[in-house]
Image (cartoon, helix red, strand yellow):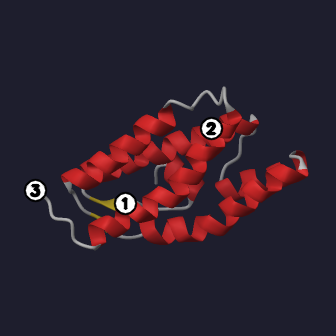
Amino acid sequence: MDKCFEWWGVILTGNQKTVKALSELLDINKALFQNLYKVQADTIEELVNKLYELVPEYEKKFLNYVNEQLPNLRRYLQVEIPYNPKLVSSIDYEIYISSAEIDCEYPFDARGCIITFFQRVPDIIDLYKEGFSAE
């Protein structure tokens, strides 16, 4: 299993092009997380647990959000991911937005990208499930 998949606790299956795009998005968000706090860990849970001990109280709200959203994200990613040009385009857009913040020069924006990632991935998958057709 891909190291990034292990870090997030997911297994992506389906169309290779779509899985590759989602994998890149997962990699970027992993890097955002680790660059934001300058902390490395083998899994996202391990990272969040380490961060609870290191961050000020106001940052714990962000970590709580991540902990609450992680099961939802995993559930949405545990499907056979099909190829759909609109799906891949949506993922590519998220990659473009998130990769601009990978250096975490602006921590508020980096946190925003991570929050958006947790919100948008289920939305993107739902759009596909609701049947926007491959054109």
Quarter of the figure with the C terminus: bottom left
**Alpha-carbon span between mark 2 and mark 1:** 21 Å
SS of the residue under disc 3: loop
Badge 2, how many Cα within 10 Å: few under 14, some, many 20+?
some
Instruction: Please state the horizontal and vertical placement of residue 111, each as a whole percent of the image.
Output: 65, 44
**Marks 2,1: beta carbons within 8 A:** no
Circle 1 is placed at which residue position?
A: 124
Residue at the left extreme, as displayed? 135
Circle 3 is placed at which residue position?
A: 135
Closest to the camera, between mark 2 and mark 1, is 2
Badge 1, how many Cα within 10 Å: few under 14, some, many 20+?
some
Instruction: Please state the horizontal and vertical placement of residue 7, each as a whole percent of the image.
Output: 59, 52
Closest to the camera, between mark 2 and mark 3, is 2
Q: Is residue 128 left or right of residue 96?
A: left
Instruction: Please state the horizontal and vertical placement of residue 62, each as a whole percent of the image.
Output: 73, 55
- Residue nearest the viewer, comparing 121 with 53: 121
Q: Is residue 26 left or right of residue 34?
A: left
Amino acid type at circle 1 is Ile
- Residue nearest the viewer, comparing 105 with 4: 105
SS of the residue under disc 1: helix
Q: Is residue 111 left or right of residue 5?
A: right
Instruction: Please state the horizontal and vertical placement of residue 131, each as a whole percent of the image.
Output: 22, 71
Amino acid type at circle 2 is Asp
**Marks 3,1: beta carbons within 8 A:** no
Badge 3, how many Cα within 10 Å: few under 14, some, many 20+?
few
Q: Which numbered disc covers residue 70? A: none
Where residue 69 sits, quadrant-wise, is bottom right
Circle 2 is placed at which residue position?
A: 109
